[in-house]
Image: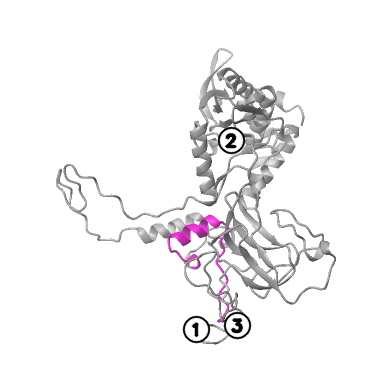
Amino acid sequence: MPDFRLPDLGEGLTEGEIVTWLVSVGDHVSIDQPVVEVETAKAVVEVPCPFEGVVSARFGEPGERLAVGSVLLTVGEPEPEPLPESSEYSGNVLIGYGTSTTPRRRRRASHVHDPRVVRSGPPSSTLRTPVNGSPAANGASAANGSAAGPVPAAAPAVISPLVRQLARENGLALDRITGTGPGGVIRRADVERELAARTAPTTGQAVPDQAVPNQAGPDRAGPGQDAPAPTGGRRIPLRGLRGTVAAKLVASRREIPEATVWVDVDATDFLAARAALPSVSLLALLARFTVLGLKKFPELNSRVEGDEIVVLDQVHLGFAAQTDRGLVVPVVRDAQSLTTAELAAALAARTTAAREGRLTPADLTGGTFTVNNYGVFGVDGSAAIINHPEAAILGIGRIMDRPWAVDGQLAVRKVAQLTLAFDHRVCDGGTAGGFLRFVADCVESPITALADL
C-alpha cells in the first residue's frame, strides 16, 4: 500500500493547507488524477497522485496545514494490472505538470467530512487516533458498532478558500448562508453580511453612562493609568497568500530605499486607442508602453543581489489583479517578445485564471517589473510599494475630465496621473524621470507604440 505524500511544491514552499478533498476513502484513482486542493503561500493548486488504485485512507481535513513530506493518502488494493514503469507510477508530482498521456478518469469531488476517516483532538499533521489499531477507519463506528452513518448533504457552493476561512474563523455555518453569486455561490460579501447581522446590537440595548472626565472606572483610565486594551473583534492569521504578501511588503520597506516620481498626462488619445482596439485593455496598452520604456531604460528591469545590481535581459511583467483571495500579481513571461495583441491576450488569460483560482505558484513568481491600474478603485494616484525584489512599479490612476492647455487654448481633456516608485540604488532620478516621461509620451501619442499590430 503506497503512501502518497505532500510533494515539494517548489519556490521555497514548505507547507500547504488542505482546502478540499477531491476523492473519498474507497474511490478508485488513476495515475496523475488530482486528489486534493491545497492552498500554499502562492496559490490554490490541485495535487495529482502518481499512483493508481483504491484510496484506503486519507490524512488531514480542510483547514489543516501539512508540512511537505506528510502523508496525504494511502492507495491500496485492488492493485492495477502490471504496466510498464512509465505508466504504472508516474513519479512526477510537480504542480501543474502531468506525466501520463492516458486520459484522467472522472473524479468525484468530496467537499464534506468522510465518516470513514476518524480523527481525535485538534487538527494536526501528527496527532491521529486509529480505529481498532488500524491507521484508517474502514469499518464500524466506534460509538455504536454500526456501519458509517448516512452520507451528509451536499456541501454549499463556495469557490474561494478565503470565504471558507472567513466563515470558519467566525464560527459561521456555510450551509445556513444564502449565496448571491452565480448559481447560488457564496461570496465574501454574503459571509460578511451574515457576520454583521449576528454582531449588530439588539433593539433597546442600554446606553452606557457618559464618561466623566478624569473619573476612573472599569472602562475608563484614571490619571497615570493606561487605557484598557480593546476586546472582541476577530483575528485573521497572517499565513498563506496574505502572509506572503505581508512578508514581501515588509522586506520591500526594510531593504529598498525607494523614491516616487509622478506626472499628469493627457489620456484623451489613450482612450481613443482603447476604443479602436476592443480586444486590448487599458492595462494592456500601459503594459506595452512599459515594455518599450524598459528597452530604453533597462536599469529599471533589474534587482539588487548583495553588492551587485543585476540588469535582466528578459522582461517578466507582473500586474496587480484583485480576486476574492485578495490582491495577487500574476506574471507574463518574456513580455518583451510579445506584440500588443499577444500581450493583451496573455494579461486577459491570467486575470481570468487568477479570479478562478487556477494559477500555479510558478504563475505568481519571477516577475522583474510590475504595472498597476489602481484607477479601477477610483483613486487619482498612489505611492505604491515595490514588489520585492523588483526595482520599480508603475501605476496609473483614474482618468477624469480636467481643464488642460492644448495649443495655447484651455480645453477639457481626459487626464490621468502616472506614478513610478523605484529603487534608488539601481538608478538616479534622471533615469527614472526619463522612463516615466517616455511612458507618458506614449500615453499621449499611443499610435507610435502600436506599430506592431
Residue at the disc numbered 3: 139
Magenta residue check for 15 = no
Q: Position of residue 54 (x, y in %)?
A: 71, 73
Q: CA distance from mark 2 to mark 1?
A: 55 Å
Mark 1 surroundings within 10 Å by alpha-carbon count, few (fewer than 14), some (14 through 19), many (20 or more): few
Q: Quadrant for residue 232, please give it.
A: bottom left
Amino acid carrying mark 1 in the image: Ala
Mark 2 residue type = Pro
Q: How many marks?
A: 3
Q: Residue at x 57, y 79 (%)?
A: 133
Q: Is residue 56 left or right of residue 207?
A: right
Q: Residue at x 53, y 71 (%)?
A: 128
Q: Which residues are magenta?
A: 148-175
What is the magenta segment's predominant secondary structure?
A: loop
| Residue on which the image places disc 2 | 389
Would you say residue 279 is visible in this rendering?
Answer: no
Q: Amino acid at mark 3?
A: Gly
